[in-house]
Amino acid sequence: MSDEKRTEISDLGEFGLIEKINESARAELTTTIKGIGDDASVHDAGDKYILISTDLLIEGVHFDLAYMPIQHLGFKAIAVNISDIVAMNGTPKQMTVSLALSNRFSAEAVQVFYEGVKAACEKYNVDLVGGDTTASPSGLMISVTAMGECDKEKIVYRSGAKENDILCVSGDFGGALVGLQVLEREKQEFLANPEMQPKLDDYEYIVGRQLRPQARLDIVHELAQVGVVPTSMIDVSDGLTSDLFHICKQSDVGFSIYEDKLPIDKQTFETAAEFSMDPNACALNGGEDYELAFTVKQEDFDKIEKFEDISSIGYMHSKEKGRVLVTSGNQIIELEAKGWKHF
Ligand code: ADP
Ligand code: MG
């Protein structure tokens, strides 16, 4: 390899790198229905599909223990994986959790972490069935794998969106990013003056969005209740725009979303202003909301309209019409994926 040219991973980007990995991935078994490229892989298990998804959480990259209580971290590690199973319209069933721990961590700290894991397992009705434990030269690394299942006729990929489908989302957006700004500010104030108590009372909702995100399993249940199977779905972990781009790329469509339809919580809105951030930009580009974005056929939309936590934000159209935001002033703006970048 030494004579060959060196490509920086940051030039390729996370998704470019995954595409390269995919080129050498084997997916030959007839039971491998979907390999790399969606929120979870899909496997034929006879009368059902089995879903598998895995995530890695690294201290200093994904979380900062200066403001992340370790119990919440345990909860979040499970919730974000369940979110990927949910994004396939599946039901999570079993989890494995693996830890690499530096000697900074005590057995008690690990126990508290697992209290959070247990709380999430109870909330989402999943079992913790294994994992691995090892030493780390520095910091904490957490690897979680979630397994779930889905009725074959209910599976939803990123690739099924069609022109004229209605684009829907669950919950609200931007809260986790603005919550993170609050936590960062309090951390800096604490570092400057360790006597100070954090002032988080006015920011409870958005801080909770950052520290203890929820997987939207309730939305999968609601969809099932009214017999609606979305045409495509993704969970929004990197940012609404950049995750919608995955749907566009895999479904070969474009979309229009309306600025005044973006669901933004009042606390997100007001706190964004406090940080001189544009709340709409926070909703479009902020990561870690772990809400669902999905498309439904027009005729299915009135069946789900009644659900309070589902809103329509736009519609899908041809790729040629682009991926655009229609502003409150009726301007059409071509969107860019400015979401979370790991490299
Ligand atoms: P998500 O944000 O939903 O967790 P990712 O963007 O992490 O999804 O991953 C996209 C797809 O790429 C998934 O199908 C995932 O399994 C796959 N993937 C990511 N990293 C690797 C890797 N190192 N090897 C094989 N597949 C990978
Ligand atoms: Mg995902």
Image: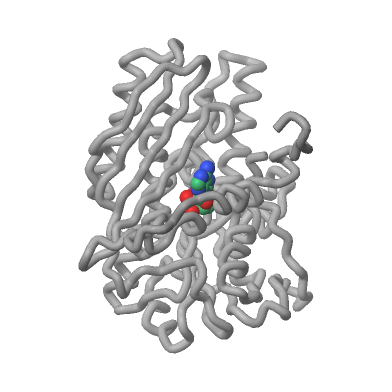
Q: Nearer the viewer, residue 144 or 188?
A: 144
Quadrant in the picture for residue 274: top right
Residue at 43% of width from left, 28% of height from top?
A: 69
Residue at 57% of width from left, 47% of height from top?
A: 21
Q: Nearer the viewer, residue 166 or 15?
A: 15
Q: Is residue 254 left or right of residue 136?
A: right
Q: Nearer the viewer, residue 180 or 145?
A: 145
Q: Is residue 267 visible?
A: no
Residue most extreme to the top: 103
Q: Is residue 20 left or right of residue 229?
A: right
Q: Is residue 157 visible?
A: yes
Quadrant in the picture for residue 152: bottom left
Image location of residue 273, percent across then percent down = 69, 49
Q: In this figure, what is the number of numbered marks?
A: 0
Image colouring: one colour
Judge whether 26 appears above or below 116 on screen: below
Residue at 40% of width from left, 56% of height from top?
A: 41
Q: Quadrant of the N terminus?
A: top right
Q: Is residue 150 left or right of residue 312?
A: left
Image location of residue 263, percent across then percent down = 55, 64
Judge whether 196 appears above or below 264 on screen: above
Quadrant in the picture for residue 259: bottom right
Judge whether 302 appears above or below 194 on screen: below
Residue at 71% of width from left, 46% of height from top?
A: 12
Image location of residue 30, percent across then percent down = 34, 63
Q: Quadrant of the C terminus?
A: top right
Residue most extreme to the bottom: 299
